[in-house]
Image: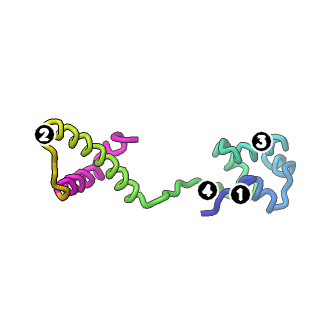
Amino acid sequence: MTARPAGGWVRAIRSALGMSTTDLARRLGVTPVAVRKLEASERAGTARLDTLARAADAMGCDLVYAFVPRASLEEIVRDQAEKVAAEQLRRVETTMALEDQRVEDARERDRLRAERVRALTTSPHLWRELA
């Protein structure tokens, strides 16, 4: 992925095309001040997608909107399941310890956690458990 230019994509593409703010404003049917406001709102992360799409079209471009996962989706689900399982097992172990039924065997604890993670990865409640 390419990082967003410091001045924003609208300004970068407009400048690369040799298009002034007045030229882009005319193509959009707005004032040059509105183009400068659009460029500022894009830099601030508050520009509306429909406005960016209109600006892209006016410059002969397509707006591409995408979510790019930082890890594979499987990894994201597994990591969430690990967090939820750890918290659930912590609660269970606390209750069991209070009742003098603590699980002492580390292998048994790991097996229980692995089973819980496996169950959680397909649970419709996975994302409701922890933030």
Label 3: state its secondary structure. helix
Q: Mark 2 belongs to which amino acid? A: Asp
Q: Are marks 4 and 2 in contact (CB under 8 Å)?
A: no
Q: Earlier in the sequence, mark 1 or mark 4?
A: 1
Dot 4 corresponds to which residue?
64
Dot 1 corresponds to which residue?
5
- Look at the image and tell me whether residue 9 can be seen: yes
Label 2: state its secondary structure. loop
Numbered label tally? 4
Q: Real-space Cα distance between discs 2 and 1?
A: 60 Å
The kind of secondary structure the magenta stretch mainly shows is helix
* Numbered range of the magenta stretch: 108-131
Numbered circle sitting on residue 37? 3
Question: Residue at left 23%, top 51%?
Answer: 116
Q: Earlier in the sequence, mark 4 or mark 2?
A: 4
Q: Mark 3 belongs to which amino acid? A: Lys
Q: Earlier in the sequence, mark 3 or mark 1?
A: 1
Structural crowding at the residue carrying mark 4, measured as other residues with C-alpha within 10 Å and reported as few (<14), some (14–19) or many (≥20): few
Q: Real-space Cα distance between discs 3 and 1?
A: 17 Å
Label 4: state its secondary structure. loop
Q: Nearer the viewer, mark 2 or mark 1?
A: 2
Q: Nearer the viewer, mark 3 or mark 4?
A: 3
Q: Real-space Cα distance between discs 4 and 2?
A: 58 Å
Q: Is residue 59 magenta?
A: no
